[in-house]
Amino acid sequence: MNTRRETYLPGAATMLFIALALLFLPWLGEILFNSKGEPREAIVAVSILRSGDWILPTNYGGDIPFKPPFLAWLIAGLATVLNGGVVNEYISRLPSAIAVIAMVMGGYAWASRERGVRFGLIFAFVTATCVEVFRAGIACRLDMVLTACMVGAMYLLYPIGDERTRRRGLRWLAAWVLLSCAVLTKGPVGSLLPCFVVGVYRLLRGDRFFPTLGKMLGLAIAALALPAWWFYEAANRGGQHFVDLMYEENLGRLFGTMSYDSHVKPVWYNFVTLAAGTLPWIIAALFAVFSWRKWHRSPLRPAGLFSFVAVILIVGFYCIPESKRSVYLLPAYPFIAYALASIIDSDAARRPMRVFAWFISIVAIVAPLAFVGLQLYPVEPVPAFEASPWWAYAILAVPAICGIAWIINRHSPVGHMLVTVWALMLAYAASVAPAVLNRQSDFKVVERLTDGNPTVLSLDYTGTHRLYTLNFYLDDRIRTTPSLEEASNYPSGTIVLISEHADTTGLWRNFTFEPLLDRSCDHRDKLGIAIRK
């Protein structure tokens, strides 16, 4: 495929870093926790700082974490250094934001070395603004930290074996550190899958089988050394219960032998989520289909072959388990972005990119106006949005200005596309998401549960029922009780949180009851409180 000639872009790396920092860093604390995933991760860091136990802390009265502790270590460390040991929404999400910025900057260095600075910038902006990558980069979840470690290691290992490779020893060492961190984030897949991808790529490039197998397998196993130390220490504290939990979450999830159903989906689910996760750039690629006659066949570049192998193997691997989630596929997104950037940068797609520039510019003008209109004049069944501060409206104007700029000056459609999509993501993180999501958070009822500093219990009717959001905002004060009969042994004024599906036998004998939430953001159930008489 033909691509445009290199353009001189001084200060490109600095410009990219500033754009990424503005996109991800300032707005992390604006959105309250509104689902169980984020506070479930954050509360582990809270328990680390409260107990001083960095190996196997417990929360919710006795729960041990489901995953290895690297994300919790990062959150606890950042809270200690930056916020006096206090974990809040901003600190909890900061590791993900740092991870996505580091991953994109590393991808820029890799792609610009292979195909020039212009392509590197396109690749970096496309990677950062894919919906799934952007969403993971502003969330307190372990998936972006895992992805950054895995992808960063693959970038480092990609040129190893080529004669032009310099500082090979440092690259191996850096890759080992990243793979070790990946394993400490989510288990052995963090080292095995990247080494598998790099090994297959090296074989396709002509490397000998057994030396390649030895190097990649040796590195993957070496990356298990530090996690093995943590596992040994944690097993000594957690016993067989911890060992069984780790087995179930890693091997049981892979082979479909878990004791409970967890995100069981058909194979086609992965491809639907990939299409949705690459928005809006998948639309640009679809526009380019109409110029297919202008495309010229050419051999894949080494970076193109590497990306192709990575996408096939990563997506194929995650088609094996019955458990499927969109975030599992995150390590494939930078390499999908390579293909999307190649289409966008091609001379053959010049006209389709102009069409897409018109499309995204119109969206950038209409979407902010529609959001403000729904804020001022709510329409059923769309729920009313929270009011935004004045500066949020100023940021909402940024994408509209970008869209108008394209209409006035229709030069450099690719540049306009990238900046406009960046501005839309910026407006979402700073203005739209807080107004839409904060009203869904259970934070609004925390004052009711802290008035008088009562003991707070949750009625655990399934053995795994947890109210992570409320527990985080109550500073890990909630404890579980299996029945109201047991809760009757607590003193007067004790509060019991009761889901609509729980067994309430004996409620009226020893408790008064009142509704609390029409919809818990953790489990989407109605929630009430029983107060011990």
Image (cartoon, rainbow, N blue to C red):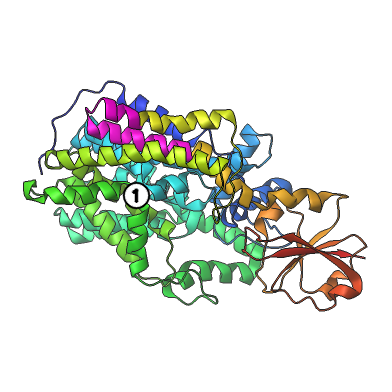
| Residue placed most toward the observer, 218 or 421 | 421
What is the residue that sits farthest to the top in this orientation? 10
* Quadrant for the N terminus in the image: top left
The reply, left or right, for residue 492 in relation to residue 367 is right
The reply, left or right, for residue 408 in relation to residue 135 is left
What is the crowding at mark 1: few (fewer than 14 residues within 10 Å), some, or many (at least 20)?
some
| Residue placed most toward the observer, 137 or 243 | 137
Q: Quadrant of residue 478?
A: bottom right
Reply yes or no: does residue 415 show up in magenta: yes
Q: Which residues are magenta?
A: 403-428
User: Residue drawn at (36%, 38%), measured in percent from left and top?
Assistant: 421
Q: Is residue 479 visible?
A: yes
SS at badge 1 = loop
Counting from the top left corner in percent of width and height, residue 461 is at 71, 74
User: Residue drawn at (64%, 57%), measured in percent from left and top?
Assistant: 56
User: Residue drawn at (42%, 74%), measured in percent from left and top?
Assistant: 255
Counting from the top left corner in percent of width and height, residue 114 is at 20, 38
Residue ID for mark 1: 279
* Quadrant for the C terminus in the image: bottom right
